[in-house]
Image (tube, helix red, strand yellow):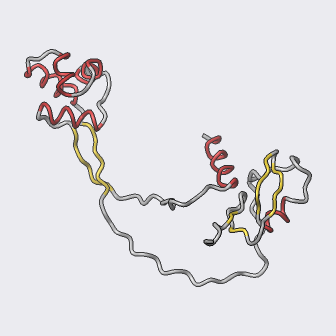
Amino acid sequence: MGKAKPKYCEICGAPIKGQGHRIRVEGAEVLVCHRCYEKYGGKKPGTFSIMPTGRQPRRPSRPVSRPKPAPKPKRERPLITEEIVEDYAERVYKAIQRSGKSYEQLSHEIGLSMNDLRAIAHGYREPTIKEAKKLEKYFKIKLIESTGEEIIEKPTIPRDYEPTLGDIANIRIKKRKK
């Protein structure tokens, strides 16, 4: 038989050694590590919340010194952003006039609805990049301009990552502030 999948604490996300502990938190039964069990297990069920209170957690009394890993060299690669040109409506409208076809004919040939085509041609709404590409290809006009900007690295989440209860609590709090 293969190695059992490690269990993770549903509050802090730490790997659980051994069986782990089952406790009730706000009416839900959760599997927790020994540290979270000591912290939350002794309290009466439903009387406490793991939602962060804004207070800073206590720091350990002795400083823990760990060698800092060498920073990885960043790959500088300009981020290309695509923007719709300001006079998109005028360009699309003129192209439609030049074609001499009806909105109905064009909507079938381009793959956009008549309403979308009209709204874009009359400037009621800006086309999406996908729509603009269809219009560019069909009418052979330029609607998208590319601008280069500094790249902003986004943190990546590993495929096998499972959010913990603590992560979900933090996510909810972040959303509520908006």
Left or right: residue 5 compared with residue 116: right
Quadrant (top left/top right/bottom left/bottom right) for the N terminus:
bottom right
> Residue at coordinates 21% horizontally, 22% vertically from top-left?
107
**Quarter occupied by residue 175:** top right
Quadrant (top left/top right/bottom left/bottom right) for the C terminus:
top right
Residue in front for this viewpoint, 76 or 34:
34
Q: Position of residue 84 (x, y in %)?
A: 26, 37
Q: Position of residue 25 (x, y in %)?
A: 81, 50
Give the number of callouts: 0
Left or right: residue 26 compared with residue 86: right
Left or right: residue 45 compared with residue 147: right
Residue in front for this viewpoint, 21 or 163:
21
Q: Is 66 rendered above or below residue 163?
A: below
Q: Is 75 rendered above or below residue 127?
A: below
> Residue at coordinates 29% horizontally, 38% vertically from top-left?
129
Q: Is 132 rendered above or below residue 53?
A: above
Left or right: residue 87 compared with residue 72: left
Q: Position of residue 14 (x, y in %)?
A: 69, 67
State the residue lying farthest toward the front.
Answer: 1
Residue in front for this viewpoint, 155 or 21:
21
Q: Position of residue 142 (x, y in %)?
A: 16, 37
Residue in front for this viewpoint, 103 or 64:
103
**Quarter occupied by residue 121:** top left
> Residue at coordinates 69% horizontally, 55% vertically from top-left?
166
> Residue at coordinates 22% horizontally, 30% vertically from top-left?
88
